[in-house]
Image (cartoon, rainbow, N blue to C red):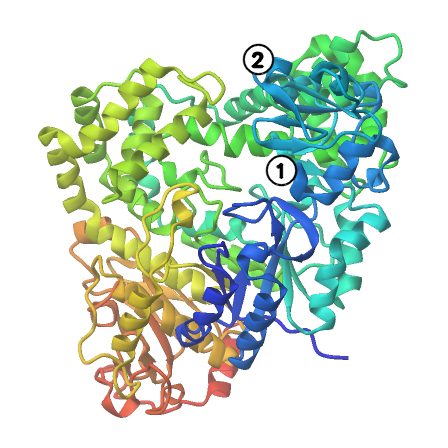
Amino acid sequence: MSTKRIPTSTYRLQVTSDFDLTAAKDVVDYVRDLGADWLYLSPVLQAEPGSQHGYDVVDHTHVDTDRGGDEGLRALAEAAHAAGLGVLVDVVPNHVGVATPEANPWWWSLLEHGQGSPVAWAFDVDWEAGDGRIRVPVLDDRLLDAVELRDGRLFVGETAYPTAPDTVHDGDSVETVHARQHYEFVHWKRADHELNYRRFFAVNTLAAIRVEEPEVFAASHATIGGWFRDGLVDGLRIDHPDGLYDPAGYLQDLAGLTGGAYTLVEKILEPGEELPSSWPVDGTTGYDALGLLDRVFVDPAGEDTLTAASGAEPTDWKQLTHDTRRGIADGILGSEVQRLARLLRPVADGLPHERVVDAVAEIVASFDVYRTYLPEGAHDLIAALEGAAAARPDLDDVIDRIAPALVDPSSAAAVRLQQTSGMVMAKGVEDTAFYRTSRLTNLSEVGGDPSIFAVSVGDFHQAQRDRLGSWPHTMTTLTTHDTKRSEDTRARIAVLAETGHEWSSALERLQSLVPLEDAVLADLLWQAIVGARPASRERLHAYAEKASREAGNSTTWTEPDEDFERRMHALVDAAFDEPAVVAVLDALDERIDAAGWSNGLAQKLVQLTAPGVPDVYQGTEFWDRSLVDPDNRRPVDYTERRHVLAELDGPDDDGPEQLPAVGLDGAAKLLVTSRALRVRRDHPELFTRYLALEATGSAADHVLAFDRGGAVTVATRLPIGLRRVGGWGDTLVHPVPLDRVDLLTGRRFTAARGIPLSELLADYPVALLVPAHVVEPTDHGTAAVDDARTTPADPATGSDATETDAQAEIDILEGHA
């Protein structure tokens, strides 16, 4: 039996028809040269025609033909393996795309034959609620006048729907034919409260499947199983496990299918929440790590000033998220709440249906986590029940009546509640509340809690030790296809916590120049403009529209307020056209640029060298100032990245003749990324432990440093504050005293009681030190020891210590412990 393969790092690629598997194969050598260990692919099974993301799978039997098909995946996998890279693929077990029924054989069959379809068992439909028909919410105000009968099919626009056998006869009207079908076209607005099939969140065109049924699992995972039997794929990323009937059971089935291969779950953990230890997985996709990485580079001293600057923003995050979740439960996910209430009828006999619906909505709005996993997570459910009862004492009798069914793991209502709470949390918090808070917007990230403003260095170190001890192979990330802002955008926004009153004054000036009555949204938009600058006008207009409609305070997706949106778009235009506004933004740029670069390099190096398996999202080895999707899924220029990487490596693989500047061209970030990825891949023995390193001196609060068992990371934090105290001065960092080389500069540091940060960080705000013996003239892309600059021996000891054996450091580290 083969040994389970574990990546040291991954590189995420968004596979589309424009960047297909053949194009992905063409960057295998670049990813290898960069230093990443595995390729990490977005979903590749057959998706909706024209899909840009692949999460709307319509056919599980083969790889998407527009993305390169089965042969494209095989060729990519073979090329990756030949280059020494593993392959991780994103899979979607919870739902399928149904926007184009003809493209999805299962959905077409369901519509054609209803409950008599041979695949009816695949879908989660409440047939009783629809009087035996499935409701399809595709009509506008014209209702059935929008439907045509052509060639024995019903059409809504150009989308075809099947007709049941023997239900179409010459002379039949659309209304007559429609009435004979196993489905019913309804107005799209009815979906919120009357839909009778489970969706992915509130997306009508993504229908959930019952993968808990053995037949459905087998049919939807046969191709995936073949990938492992053929040795094409080495690991999986599981999308949205919280939507599944039984996540633990599904993951057990999956482990059996893949032989226990490396598996990650897109599980959003709230602060303090732990991944269920019973799951046979290697960890999450890394949002929990992202939240800590962001906050350790935020100045806690800026909290009060930014809170005051945010003005009308709600100050009680818990109340805000309760209210936004309740709005979702009463609104776009009302269908799920209604279905839960129907399941509770046996225990709620005699209670008015409306009161049961009210109680269920209050309960799902009261969770502090996305989902419970009964019986393992019963305490979270009990807390939600108690919270709902405290908030709504008028519903005490209803909650008492239905609570036993909701805490019984064998109850259908309990299972449905578990599947529903995560949807309400995601839509109510990620897609609503995050757009209604603007104090410091880099904190509004998936899995994060914006009320937690900053994290201390000590708490950060403890979290890394915990990760290494509990989930050493979990993914860590800074940017994904789902992040609200990319890592470098957030790194710039984080600087605002250090500028305090300067940002407050700038915001007040901007508000006076371009007034917008929604002050919270205006603050959020100005931070996006500052963080993503120099983003194009078109990108910022698209972001403003999405952000404002997601917030739902002044305009919405379903009922846009054209007058408000015109004023909002005028704000964006002013950032380009109004000289006074541009002057304010230029002054902010001048103030935060260098600090934003410092934060960007620091968080990148820390993520790449800290415990876990770091992922590099496509293109973020350069500076990337993106906003929410689809902005963060723009094409990547690999030609330019190859060119810069070749320049960094130099003609003899001994590094550049001149160190790259920390500027907009991205070379410095590529240097940090490639050197960290390569040493992690090529010298895993240097990444076996986690030891927080002490710093002493006048600027000790501005350094974050740790030793991974040989590799030492040193990063600057709060760079504007560092400037205020006059720089590093007498500050020293204290690693185990061995001869070391900084992989970024080639500078050598001899064993000493402490390394002066004024010397170590003279070129960059970060350093990556390794034992000197690791860096040899033949090492790829690193400076040779013989040519490395050397710092003097420790004057206090006269030592020029030459110990370079890795085991010696291990012994010393264990002695520290």
Q: Secondary structure at mark 2?
A: loop
Query: Which residue is drawn at the image coordinates 84% and 46% (left, top)?
Result: 213
Q: Amino acid at mark 2?
A: Arg
Q: For the residues marked 1 and 2, what is the alpha-carbon distance in whole angstroms?
A: 21 Å
Rendered location of residue 644, percent (x, y)? 27, 70
Query: Which residue is drawn at the image coordinates 70% and 11% (left, top)?
Result: 393
Which of the image's four quarters has the C terminus?
Answer: bottom right
Name the one closer to the observer, 480 or 734. Answer: 480
Left or right for 330, reference 465: right
Image: 757 above or below 770: above
Mark 1 or 2, nearer chain start: 1
In the rendered structure, find residue 100 and report the number of the disc placed on it: 1
Rendered location of residue 676, percent (x, y)? 40, 71
- Total count of labels: 2
Query: In which quarter of the view is residue 113 placed?
Result: top right
Query: Which residue is drawn at the image coordinates 73% and 32% (left, top)?
Result: 162
Left or right for 632, reference 142: left
Residue farthest front in this picture: 170
Image: 342 above or below 525: above
Visible in this render: residue 562? yes
Question: What residue does disc 2 label?
Answer: 142
Name the one closer to the observer, 789 or 552. Answer: 552
Q: Using a 10 Å C-alpha cutoff, classify the residue at mark 2 as few (fewer than 14 neighbours), some (14 to 19) or many (20 or more).
A: few
Q: Amino acid at mark 1?
A: Thr
Query: Which residue is drawn at the image coordinates 55% and 70% (left, top)?
Result: 76
